Image (spheres, rainbow, N blue to C red):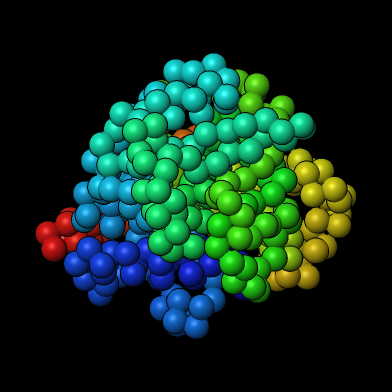
Amino acid sequence: MEQQLTIPAAYIQAMLNQAEQRGIDRAELLADIELDMQALQSNQPCSAVAYGQLHHRIIQTSGDDWFGMLSGGLVPTGALRFMCWVAVQTKTLAEAINECGHFFELCRGFKIKQSYSVEGEFAVSKMAKLEHLPAAEFDALIAVADPMTLKSTLAAWHGFLSWLIGREIPLQAMYYTFANPGGNKHCYEVYYQQDFCGYSYPAKFLSMPVIQQAENIDEFLAKAPYYAFNRTAHSSDTVTQRVKSLMAKKMGTELPQAMEIASSLHMSVTSLHRKLAQEASSFQKIKDETRMEAAILYLNSPTMSTQEVAALVGFDDPSTFSRSFKKWTGLPPGEYRKKLLSATEASGKL
């Protein structure tokens, strides 16, 4: 059985709870979304694709571009796109963080921003208050925030910065203001009950160039939640999940071959194939599933043509992509898109 890229159910539960608090009907949101309700109810990891579909639907229904992440207010539609545009005009990651900080200061709906400091060999990105905001109001905002919202916000910020430079920024540690909930395993240090929320990483990444351009923004926005959580597979014990994560990070470029993936995982190609077989998987199965998941998210964007989607998931011939997509889902991409968009339109009328 193939393993889908997954995220903790707690993230979805937190997002659904926030939606209900805003008067959005949970059943309507979940309609037509391929979410494993049994896994969700038993607090098991759920599909990252379903998370992305749900997140986009809530944004469209609520009119809040920053839904599911900590902002302090209602962020107007289009804000995220403009922030991306601001960031891709910069030259280095450090400059991008600073310019996005100015954006947060000016954009309606925000009370927090991301700032950074350098401590020895590491940079520390933190949730920080806007200049005009009283410190007491900022502290209260962080204190009452749901832990999953804080985690989602940091995951989104980390994913965004990684996208800007075209490679994942390796985390050295995460810092949270709340207490340790227990039961979590990570490939980096995690510190709880700290005086700030943030994460640290090698400071050398601050000087890395921003490689994304304005024409890449639509692609990023279509898969933003999925991109942010791709790295969660690195904490998994399965080789299948780690391969899927590495493959997903390259989506939109030439997909890596088995030799490149094996090298990234510090094993031989033979060992890679053997370990995948032991998990009832294979390199080709992972490649197909990763393409399928990315294609479904891209098809959620009405501005992207089927030909563009085909190219982004690694198909030179749109007809070949169409045949493959129908084999994966039972529907050709055009019909699948109609199903997705009609469901989104219905939810937007709530």
Give the image location of residue 313, x and y in percent.
Answer: 50, 42
- How far across and how far down the image is residue 258, in percent? 75, 46
**Residue 227 visible to an observer of this rendering:** no
Question: Which quarter of the figure has residue 84?
Answer: top left
Residue found at x 33% / y 69%: 17
Left or right of 78 in this view: 309: right
The tally of labels here is: 0
The furthest residue to the left: 349
| On screen, residue 212 above or below 337 | above
Residue drawn at (55%, 41%) of the image: 126
Q: Nearer the viewer, residue 235 or 175?
A: 175
| Quadrant assignment for the C terminus | bottom left
| Residue 254 spot, x, y in % from top left | 60, 34
Q: Is residue 3 visible?
A: yes
Residue placed at 71% from the left, 27% from the top?
204
Is 41 situated above or below 343?
A: below
Where does the N terminus fall, quadrant-wise? bottom right
* Identity of the residue drawn at 28% across and 56% down: 57
Q: Nearer the viewer, residue 331 or 265?
A: 265
Q: Nearer the viewer, residue 120 or 340?
A: 120
Camera-side residue: 76 or 221?
A: 76
Residue 183 pos. (x, y %): 65, 74
